[in-house]
Amino acid sequence: MKRTLGLERAVEMALSAGVATSGLLLLLGLVLAHEGVLRSGILILMLTPVVRVVVLTLGLFRDGDRRFGFVSLAVLAVLVAGIVLSRQ
């Protein structure tokens, strides 16, 4: 149970950091009227769920939960494939 709480906390921190960083960049981009900063904020916001899956996958494998680790790895593969295909 303690490991599960640690993993939940790590996922929470990854999501919070992504949203906070994105929000700060978006606000800064609006204040400075700088398109590049706005784009960075949007990109970070879009990548935050990917980071969540990476953190979760690593945590599951670290905790020895191979079944859900591989499921999470499959989800990560689909997300990465979607990102790669959208760039073409």
Image: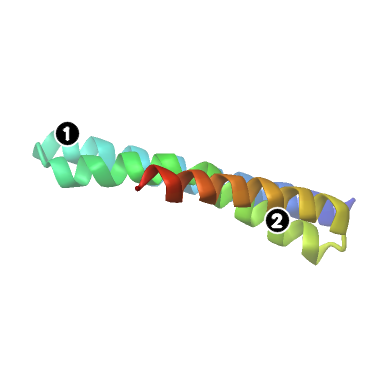
Tally of numbered discs: 2
Residue holding disc 1: 30
Residue that sits furthest to the front in the current view: 88
Going by the image, does 30 lie left or right of 49? left
User: Is residue 16 something one can see in this rendering?
Assistant: no
Residue that sits furthest to the left in the current view: 33
Who comes first in sequence, dot 2 or dot 1?
1
State yes or no: discs 2 and 1 in contact (Cβ < 8 Å).
no
Q: Above or below — where is 32 with respect to 53?
A: above
- Quarter-of-image position of residue 19: top left
Q: Residues within 10 Å of mark 2 (few under 14, many from 20)?
A: many
The numbered disc on residue 18 is none
Going by the image, does 6 lie left or right of 54? right
Q: What's the residue at 84%, 62% (across, down)?
A: 63
For badge 1, the amino acid type reads: Leu
Q: What's the residue at 9%, 36% (across, down)?
A: 33
Task: Compare residues 68 and 48 and report the one nearer the observer.
Answer: 68
Front disc: 2 or 1: 2
Q: What's the residue at 44%, 46% (across, down)?
A: 85
Which type of secondary structure does the marked residue at label 1 adopt?
helix
Residue holding disc 2: 57
Location of residue 47 in the rendering, given as x and y in whole percent from the top left corner: 45, 46
Residue that sits furthest to the bottom in the current view: 62
Location of residue 62 in the rendering, given as x and y in whole percent from the top left corner: 79, 66
Which type of secondary structure does the marked residue at label 2 adopt?
helix
Location of residue 44 in the rendering, given as x and y in whole percent from the top left corner: 38, 46
Q: Above or below — where is 88 with respect to 59?
A: above
Task: Compare residues 31 and 74 and report the one nearer the observer.
Answer: 74
Between the residue at mark 2 and the residue at mark 1, the CA separation in whole angstroms equals 35 Å
